[in-house]
């Protein structure tokens, strides 16, 4: 009977040890469940091109053989030397903001509806209108349309929570997370939430970043104004430690406190 009582704390410790530690499989990204394959063949994900929505900011640059002819179409900040300098702040004030009706206001051209268009489609519309109404093909018109940075927000169990802007045409969720300091050890990589804005409202989708099939998700590539939330694992709320050593230390401390309390109670 005494032996059983002596083994009871060991059993409790063992149970807590196995249930509170974070297993390695919950920390590794893009795992391949097919153990017989030596390598993972990742096919290039065909993501749909982004279509402009309200509150987006566009950076539009119009060039020609004689640049003086198109200066009126470029509301950018110019230095004394004539070179164009555009920071994120200046793009906010000088870029082409898409209003609630899906329009942008272009100097001389006036309002242009771009809601639901890709940046390539907007470029084609601008080039055609400029050549039809103001210039000839000999002017060598060259129009560039880009999003003024890809802005996203990461919150929850992340190294550096907050809003970031990346100046890339495409950014996947792995790059966004890495740019924000990576998911902490107590973050749930299997249940990452992506909140995305659509014309009809917001939608929430979950993606398992420990599974290699995540690259096939339509949410693997983020879009402007995506909100990424990393939930905490249950181990964090238990407070027993995230590794075996931490768990054992916590349990030993707790048992020592209980034993001391019992001994003090008996002596009273």
Image: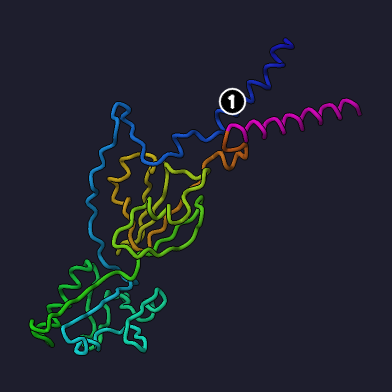
Does the magenta segment cover residue 206? no
Decide if residue 67 is in sight here. yes
Q: Mark 1 points at which residue?
A: 15
Q: Which colour scheme is used?
A: rainbow
Q: Residues within 10 Å of mark 1 (few under 14, many from 20)?
A: few
At 33% from the left and 71% from the top, the residue drawn is 148
At 69% from the left and 13% from the top, the residue drawn is 4
- Residue 60, above or below 190: below
Say which of 244 and 104 sits in front: 244
Q: On the picture, is 37 further left or further right than 140?
A: right
Magenta residues (range): 244-268
Horizontal and vertical percent position of residue 175: 38, 53
Horizontal and vertical percent position of residue 226: 38, 59
- Residue 71, above or below 38: below
Does the magenta segment cover residue 259? yes
Dividing the picture into quadrants, the one containing residue 97 is bottom left
Q: On the picture, is 139 further left or further right than 10?
A: left
Horizontal and vertical percent position of residue 177: 42, 53
- Majority secondary structure in the magenta region: helix
Hey, which residue is sitting farthest top in the picture? 1
In which quadrant will I find the N terminus? top right
């Amino acid at each position: 009977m005494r032996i059983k009582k002596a083994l009871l704390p060991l059993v409790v410790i063992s149970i807590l040890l196995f249930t509170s530690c974070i297993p390695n499989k919950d920390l590794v990204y893009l795992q391949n469940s097919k153990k017989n394959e030596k390598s993972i063949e990742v096919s290039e994900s065909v993501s749909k091109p982004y279509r402009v929505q309200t509150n987006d900011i566009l950076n539009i640059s119009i060039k020609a053989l004689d640049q003086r002819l198109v200066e009126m179409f470029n509301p950018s900040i110019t230095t004394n030397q004539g070179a164009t300098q555009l920071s994120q702040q200046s793009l906010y004030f000088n870029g082409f903001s898409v209003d609630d009706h899906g329009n942008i206001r272009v100097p001389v051209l006036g309002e242009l509806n771009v809601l639901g268009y890709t940046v390539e489609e907007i470029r084609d519309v601008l080039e055609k209108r400029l050549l039809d109404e103001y210039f000839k093909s000999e002017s060598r018109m060259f129009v560039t349309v880009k999003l003024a940075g890809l802005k996203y927000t990461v919150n929850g169990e992340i190294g550096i929570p907050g809003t970031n802007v990346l100046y890339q045409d495409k950014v996947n969720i792995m790059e966004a997370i890495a740019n924000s300091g990576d998911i902490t050890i107590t973050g749930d990589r299997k249940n990452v939430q992506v909140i995305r804005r659509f014309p009809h409202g917001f939608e929430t989708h979950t993606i398992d970043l420990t599974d290699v099939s995540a690259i096939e998700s339509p949410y693997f590539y983020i879009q402007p104004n995506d909100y990424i939330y990393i939930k905490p694992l249950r181990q964090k709320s238990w407070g027993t430690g995230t590794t075996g050593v931490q768990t054992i230390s916590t349990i030993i401390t707790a048992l020592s406190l209980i034993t001391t309390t019992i001994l003090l109670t008996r002596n009273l």
